[in-house]
Amino acid sequence: MAALLLFVSLLTVLISLLYYISQRKFGYWEKRNVPYVKPLPLLGNYAKYMLQKQYPGQMLQELCKRFPDRSYFGAFFGTEPVLVVNSPEVVKDVFTKDFYYFNGREISDHVENEIITRNLFFASGDKWKVVRQNLTALFSSSKMKKMFYLLEKCNHSLEDMLTYETSKNNVIEARDLGARYTMDCICSCAFGVDSMVMGKETNNVFKTMAEQIFEASNTRGLKMILRAAWPSLFYGMKMQLFPSTIDEFFSKLLKGVFESRNHKPSPRNDFVDLVLTFKNEENLIGDSISNSKTGKDTKIKLKVDDDLLVAQCILFFAAGFETSATTISFTLFELAKNPAVQEKVIAEIDEYVARQKNKLEYECVNDLPYLDAAVYETLRMYPIFGILTREVMDDYQFADGVKVEKGLRVHIPVYHFHFNPDYFRDPEEYKPERFLPENKKDLKPYTFFPYGEGPRICIGSRFAKMQVMAGLITILKEYRVELGEDMPKSLNLDARTILIAPREQGLNIKFIRREGSEQRKWVRT
Ligand code: HEM
């Protein structure tokens, strides 16, 4: 009996303690006189996402609709205060104008806990600035142009893969198809290796790595939420978001490529070459992030070690394929649903192929405005990140006098902006016309963020555009697409992943060979 009493008392103390901890920061917005939604204990205002019931972009959209006239409002991500930005003007301040104060992505103090998160995407402050400055050269348009011949070869393999796959079954899961193609592109252009992922062999080590990085499971979803909401607890309990097999694989891959190049940069001028240059120089030099505040010209030296290089390498692999594969597959899905749009896309592609005499060239990124607009429309409806995050890195005061401190989370509700009828009329409709060159002037600045905005904007957008446009041309010059038999027209989005993805079902697309497709095969030199 005494033991039971002790147990009940301990449990009561524990529950009271948890309740106290879960409520402790709930006065944050009240104190600052910022409107907010009354939070639930422990889960705050993000319950539907934290319980993996709703895609985070849509969850935040619902919250934003409660404050239509506020340029920002307060909320709680679990127990933690978060500022949600709700107007283009404040988005501009956060992304661009006052970037110095918002240069972190999230939980910046914890990114060194795993090798895989020690990369440009998660970095902040001086480290972010120096790495970004040193990597930017890799993505210039002249670099893209020079590496296009590698991408052209990947498109020949895509052509072959489609012939083989459609001969077995003409309904293909488009996410997998897109991933095999973009994985091949990034492996070839960034690392100089042939991934063989578009070959007939289904067992492929790059595919296995990809599955480990983007595992869509309840356990991974839960880990992501735990890490994002309570990082000290997460790492305190010795948890890791990613398995160490990923670091090990990429570490070995880089080492092998370095050796095959005799530890000297090659004429390929690719990512591995740049990394080799870093390795030989020992330090990366760049500007201090605080220069924009102080007006000084302070330089920062960042020591290069293997972990830093492996981390960027994994990032380029992960960011390089999954984002573009998602964009390709959702574009195919929308074209299958919208035959009139597909007709226009196909007409433009056929004209391009004829004009080019069946040779795919770098200029495809600029030569097909309607296809380009269709891809942008896909990115509006299926933004890779439904929420973009920033972290306050230095105490900040808004124009209206509200002060926020270092460490505060900031959420930009991308999905909400992209579906807001004030910015995009009939937002549920797929209308590429919005993004045609002559209509782009009607877009309100800071309402559309397919690649983010400001100094942290996607560094790989040129590469992305190149592989997405080329891949879609290769597919649609030979096939018309329709929805697979059981494929629903509207999708439930996955609540467990940060990157946008359909819940449960894949994107099953029927590939129907078009008349005259044999005459549109790529010439191979
Ligand atoms: C359609 C394809 C892609 C989309 C939609 C996309 C979108 C994005 C977005 C929204 C961000 C966050 C930007 C921000 O916080 O303001 C981002 C960051 C980033 N992306 Fe992409 N991305 C794509 C392809 C790529 C590719 C191909 C690469 C590399 C090969 C890449 C590398 C990166 C990196 C390194 C960052 C972090 C930049 C930083 O924090 O400084 N992305 N991307």
Image: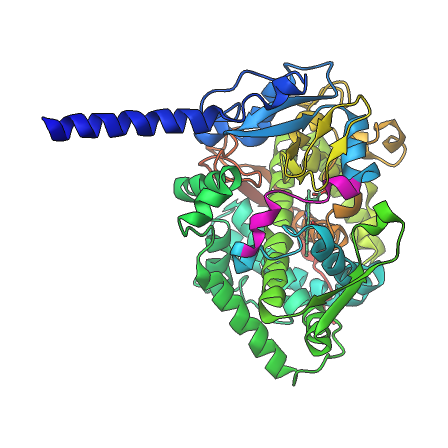
| Quarter of the C terminus within the rendering | bottom right
Asked if residue 221 is positioned above or below residue 475 in the image, the reply reads above
- Which residue is nearer to you in this view: 144 or 403? 403
| Most distant residue in the left direction | 1
Image quadrant assignment for residue 450? top right
Q: Is residue 8 above or below residue 200?
A: above
Residue 180 at x, y = what percent?
A: 56, 56
Residue 489 seen in the figure:
no
With 80 as the anchor, is 293 left or right in this view?
right
| Left or right: 449 as drawn, with respect to 54 | right
Vertical side of 235 occupied by 150: above or below? below
Q: Position of residue 263 (x, y in %)?
A: 66, 82
Considering every residue shown, the one lying at the far bottom of the view is: 262
142, 161: nearer the viewer: 142
Q: Is residue 296 left or right of residue 181?
A: right
* Residue 103 in sight here: yes
Point 72% across, 71% down: residue: 283
Magenta segment's dominant SS is helix
Q: Is residue 105 magenta?
A: yes
Q: Which residues are magenta?
A: 99-112
The residue that appears at 27% across and 28% down in the rendered structure is 11
Picture colour scheme: rainbow
- Residue 41 percent across, percent down from the top left: 45, 22
- Which quadrant would residue 161 be assigned to in this image? bottom right
Q: Residue at x 65, y 63 (%)?
A: 154
- Where is residue 511 drawn, in percent x and y? 57, 45
As for residue 322 lying within the magenta part, the answer is: no
Depth order, front residue of 10/307 = 10
